[in-house]
């Protein structure tokens, strides 16, 4: 108890000393001529405060325990100018719903949250300083010079334009813009860093070669080429502002796909199931209404109704498009560049063509993404003019998705596709969970419907790429290939067998002995389908050792 009293008393004394020091500091600011001793003598605690504490004297007021008596002449009535100005207390006023202050306050809080204010920031370029792309291309701006938010003054752009890139020993400057040399036109205009060869420096106009000028330049290049250079593949000239890339989907089709307004003939699988259920209900209602005295007639009518309606539902899944002559491709003794996701893009395939590849195929495109009009997915079906035989690989988990994609590819003008490859080999979990990729190998009924839907719509062959099986210990591709052969579906161009299982993914070596077993498993009673092997062919040595 005594220790508690002592600690309480010391605490009170410290608090009292702190209050005295604060008062002295305020008085020293207001009376700079007064010394510290005079201030200390004027500020003394009252006898009442030092006589006892609230704990010892129950009648004393706790607020007076730490009170300090100050002489009236030292009491401040106004704030000293030496002190910093006092900030006004913000009073919260209700904001009406018509004003946007509450929204601004909320947005400011969000903008301040989680930002690194000290990080270096790039200087923002005003929109008025950017160049209008229509002016760069030499076209008329659709918004007009008054309403367009970008700059239309070519002379001002030329004044602020940096010098051309010289490169090593001025090589780039001597060669000039490659687009100008090859196509006779550059899409970047005044923004091209090698554009001094195709820019009118006085007006800023982007120049364009005529067809005769391009032909004369091409003939000069042919005369200057050496024998080694003549053997290299030549890039064909494209005159004017046009794109050489093929299989570019139109804007109108993209909008229809995104808005789900594309006029598909094939119905979705769940729509077909609903129609079947409705037709069954109608059939049961008709049967009940018939006369019970003629059971045989009822059974005959029932069989007739079932056959006709089932046929109508089946026709709904297969579009009634006009028949076209099917193209044929000879896959024998050809070098086929396998579709490689994230690797086998268009520039890579162009390089492969220069090194002697015969057949190329685009990267795997997901059918559900294509049907939603995703631009990144439709970019995978683009084709370069140098690709002689080109195919598109599609991965889907339902027959109606394959059929609908076939409709779009067939109806789109300007599309040039030599074959469509069905992906039954993708091991990615995200793809297999949707029933696509390697998981489609496990469902022959879905697979048959997919093959039938593609072959009935497309006028080009359909190839099927698959793996050896789901598990390397239980390969079943040697059973699946003869089953597909027995279906007798016309239009299957080839099988491509990747010599690994789905669970094996890309580990270990491909099993080429099993690929040979799959090729020999086809029945002689039906027309044989070519089998293309795939896996671990990185050089001509691998090709010779594995194939030959």
Image (cartoon, rainbow, N blue to C red):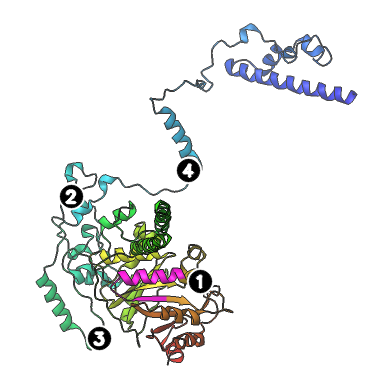
Q: Disc count in the image? A: 4
Which of discs 3 and 4 lies nearer the camera? The answer is 3
Residue found at the very far left of the displayed protein: 212
What is the CA distance from the residue labelled 1 to the residue labelled 3?
48 Å
Q: Position of residue 362 (x, y in %)?
A: 36, 71
- Residue 338 visible in image: yes
Q: Quadrant of the C terminus?
A: bottom left
Residue at 26% over, 66% down? 321
Residue found at the very far front of the displayed protein: 293
Q: Position of residue 520 (x, y in %)?
A: 46, 88
Q: Which residue matches tag 4?
A: 117
Q: Which residue matches tag 3?
A: 231
Q: Which residue matches tag 2?
A: 141
Which of discs 1 and 3 lies nearer the camera? The answer is 1
Please name whichever residue, 498 or 387, is drawn nearer the observer in this view of the structure. 498
Which of discs 4 and 2 lies nearer the camera? The answer is 2
Q: Secondary structure at mark 2?
A: loop
For marks 4 and 2, the one nearer the N-term is: 4
């Amino acid at each position: 108890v005594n220790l508690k009293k002592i600690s309480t008393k010391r605490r009170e004394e410290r608090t009292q000393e702190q209050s005295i020091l604060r008062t002295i500091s305020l008085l020293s600011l207001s009376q700079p001529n007064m010394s510290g001793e005079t201030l200390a003598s004027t500020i003394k605690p009252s006898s009442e405060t030092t006589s006892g504490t609230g704990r010892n004297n129950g009648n004393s007021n706790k607020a007076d325990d730490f009170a300090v008596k100050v002489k009236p002449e030292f009491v401040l009535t106004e704030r000293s100018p030496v002190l910093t100005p006092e900030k006004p207390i913000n009073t919260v006023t209700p904001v009406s719903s018509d004003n946007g202050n509450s929204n601004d306050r909320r947005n400011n809080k969000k903008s301040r949250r989680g930002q690194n204010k000290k990080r270096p920031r790039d200087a923002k370029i005003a929109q008025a300083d950017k160049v209008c792309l229509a002016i760069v291309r030499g076209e008329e701006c659709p918004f007009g010079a008054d309403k367009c938010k970008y700059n239309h003054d070519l002379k001002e752009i030329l004044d602020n334009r940096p010098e051309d890139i010289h490169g090593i020993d001025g090589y780039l400057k001597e060669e000039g813009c490659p687009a100008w040399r090859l196509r006779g036109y550059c899409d970047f205009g005044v923004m091209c860093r090698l554009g001094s060869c195709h820019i009118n420096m006085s007006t800023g106009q982007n120049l364009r070669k005529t067809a005769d000028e391009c032909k004369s330049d091409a003939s000069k290049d042919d005369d200057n080429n050496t024998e080694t250079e003549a053997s290299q593949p030549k890039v064909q000239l494209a005159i004017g502002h046009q794109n050489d890339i093929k299989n570019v989907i139109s804007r109108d089709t993209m909008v229809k796909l995104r808005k789900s307004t594309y006029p598909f003939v094939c119905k979705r699988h769940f729509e077909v199931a609903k129609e079947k259920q409705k037709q069954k209900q109608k059939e049961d209602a008709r049967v009940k209404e018939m006369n019970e005295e003629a059971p045989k007639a009822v059974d005959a009518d029932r069989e007739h109704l079932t056959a006709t309606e089932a046929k109508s539902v089946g026709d709904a899944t297969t579009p009634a498009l006009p028949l076209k002559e099917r193209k044929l491709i000879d896959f024998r003794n050809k070098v086929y560049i396998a579709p490689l996701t994230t690797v086998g893009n268009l520039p890579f395939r162009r390089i492969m063509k220069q090194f002697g590849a015969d057949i190329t195929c685009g990267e795997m495109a997901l059918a559900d993404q294509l049907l939603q009009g995703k631009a990144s997915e439709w970019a995978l079906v683009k084709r370069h003019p140098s690709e002689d035989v080109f195919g598109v690989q599609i991965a889907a988990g339902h027959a109606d998705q394959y059929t609908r994609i076939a409709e779009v590819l067939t109806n789109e003008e300007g599309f040039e596709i030599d074959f469509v490859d069905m992906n039954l080999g993708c091991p990615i979990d995200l793809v297999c969970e949707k029933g696509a990729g390697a998981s489609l190998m496990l469902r022959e009924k879905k697979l048959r419907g997919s093959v039938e839907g593609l072959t009935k719509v497309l006028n080009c062959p359909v190839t099927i790429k698959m793996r050896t099986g789901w598990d390397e210990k239980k390969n079943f591709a040697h059973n699946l290939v003869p089953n597909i052969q027995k279906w007798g579906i016309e239009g299957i161009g080839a099988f491509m067998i990747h010599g690994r299982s789905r669970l094996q993914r890309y580990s270990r070596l491909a099993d080429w002995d099993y690929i040979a077993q799959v090729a020999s498993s086809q029945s002689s009673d039906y027309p044989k389908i070519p089998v293309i092997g795939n896996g671990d062919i990185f050089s001509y040595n691998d090709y010779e050792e594995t194939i030959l």
